[in-house]
Image: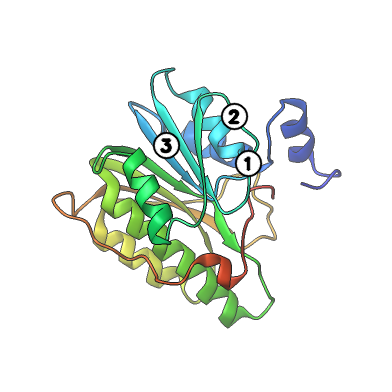
Amino acid sequence: MREDDAFFHEARRRGLRSRAALKLEAINARDRLFRNARVVVDLGAAPGGWSQVARSALPSDARVVALDILEMEPLPGVEFIRGDFRQADVLERLEASVTRRAVDLVMSDMAPNLSGMKVNDQARWRELADSAAGFALGTLEHDGAFLVKLFQGEETESYLRVLRERFASVVVRKPAASRKQSSEIYALARGPRNAGGAVDNRASLPYSTLGATNAATE
């Protein structure tokens, strides 16, 4: 977060862990992400801004499961798993925590470390987004939703086409808290078409090997 940024000051004033929390709040205000949700999974959760928003928006008996390769300070009412969900042992822990086909919302604010080389950067975010979509398709309820960060470029339309094939509806959002000069956008997909069986898009390489980070502090 930048100290000269109004959204930074707003997040800090409210005790939010990241500026990105304001982006999620704006998307939720428009799209009612948490309506009737009972289980939410936050991929790439650290430092916890999105999990904070989810926890505050959900009833006390709903579950928020957060996962990241980085450590995250505990949040009341949020279950945290440290690791890369594409590694078998971590995926098993995550899937054991969220009964298969029992997740209402999968959120991913994951982003790679950008190198400035457009081809490489596009490949890196696409790999992360594909992995998140694979997990979502394997765990969401038939009326569940998947929210994922994308970066505009040569891979964007291709990825959106895949989502439209796999989900009943897909919309694109760019909340005000997302910097105008940033290429980031968010895709919200609802109603996975494969509710009778999982589709596994997860890559075999852990995203840590691709220089991944969590851009949720942005």
Q: Quadrant of residue 96?
A: top left
Residue type at mark 1: give it: Met
Q: Residue at x 32, y 37 (%)?
A: 104
Image coords of residue 145 (percent x, y): 34, 43
- Give me the C-alpha separation between circle 2 and circle 3: 25 Å
Q: Image height check: is 187 above or below 98?
A: below
Judged from this view, the residue extending furthest toward the left is 196
Judged from this view, the residue extending furthest toward the right is 4
Q: Disc 1 designates what residue?
A: 72
Q: Secondary structure at mark 2?
A: loop
Q: Residues within 10 Å of mark 3 (few under 14, many from 20)?
A: few
- Give me the C-alpha separation between circle 1 and circle 2: 8 Å
Q: Image height check: is 156 above or below 192?
A: below
Marked residue nearer the N-terminal end (3 or 1): 3
Asked whether the beta carbons under mark 3 and mark 1 sit within 8 Å of each other, the answer is no
Say which of marks 2 and 3 sits in front.
2
Marked residue nearer the N-terminal end (2 or 3): 3
Q: Residue at x 28, y 45 (%)?
A: 140
Residue 153 in sight in this render: no
Image coords of residue 75 (percent x, y): 59, 29
Q: Quadrant of residue 183?
A: bottom right
Q: Disc 3 designates what residue?
A: 31
Image coords of residue 114 (percent x, y): 66, 70
Asked whether the beta carbons under mark 1 and mark 2 sit within 8 Å of each other, the answer is yes
Image coords of residue 166 (percent x, y): 25, 59
Tell me the colour scheme of the image.
rainbow
Q: Disc 2 designates what residue?
A: 75
Q: Residue at x 52, y 66 (%)?
A: 207
